[in-house]
Amino acid sequence: MNRVLILIDIQNDFITGTLPVPDGKAIIAPVNRLILQFDHVIATQDWHPENHFSFFTHHKGKKAFESITKDSYEQTLWPPHCVQGSEGANFFPELQMNTIAAIFRKGTNPDIDSYSAFFDNQQLKSTGLDGYLKGLSIEELHFVGLAADYCVYFSMMDALSLGYKVFLHEHCTRAINKESFEQQKRELHTYPNFTLLP
């Protein structure tokens, strides 16, 4: 069975930059070891324009991590992060990049946030990842990266809805909110195609 390792947003801003995930740097060494076990590795990259609406700095009187309602859905406001071409958007320098076959960028539309590796949050536009994987007859997706309770979680949910077998290597991810992630794991365990690896 063809399988692929997907590295979710292992970028400077999520480790040492403007939106650090607690203990995020701790995943780098185990991720690098895991990469050696896979013949096919791909990565996603948050790639926001400077005027992205999810940045709290574009909403007068709002603070980071507050919420707004936009187009009838709730949106968390984030510190500016992973701005296109910035140092914060670069992959963390200690991440082994030499075997990564493809990089899929997301969050490029200034008016829609994009947590998932597959679609934006309104599922209006695909990143092309599903077509890429199906073109290689990939059936099994192994996920690592940041943050567990946002981009990793939503990527896995979309993967399950698209019919893939999904594996999460828990030691290679970290959450922004551990309590939310525990609830999400309980939800994921209701899917027969999901496997949690320690």
Image (cartoon, rainbow, N blue to C red):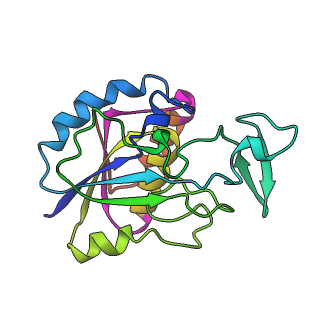
Q: Quadrant of the N terminus?
A: bottom left
Height in image: 197 above or below 45? above
Height in image: 27 above or below 166? above
Q: Residue 155: x, y in percent?
A: 44, 55
Q: Residue 53: x, y in percent?
A: 71, 54
Left or right of 121, for residue 140: left
Q: Residue at x 60, y 60 (%)?
A: 121
Q: Residue at x 44, y 35 (%)?
A: 12
Height in image: 134 above or below 41? below
Q: Across the whole image, how many numbered discs are drawn on residues?
A: 0
Q: Nearer the viewer, residue 160 or 143?
A: 143
Q: Residue 33: x, y in percent?
A: 16, 34
Q: Nearer the viewer, residue 103 or 119?
A: 103
> For the magenta stretch, what is the residue range?
161-180
Q: Quadrant of the C terminus?
A: top left
Is 93 a magenta residue? no
Q: Residue at x 17, y 57 (%)?
A: 40
Q: Quadrant of residue 193?
A: bottom left
Q: Quadrant of residue 73?
A: bottom right
Q: Nearer the viewer, residue 91 or 156?
A: 91
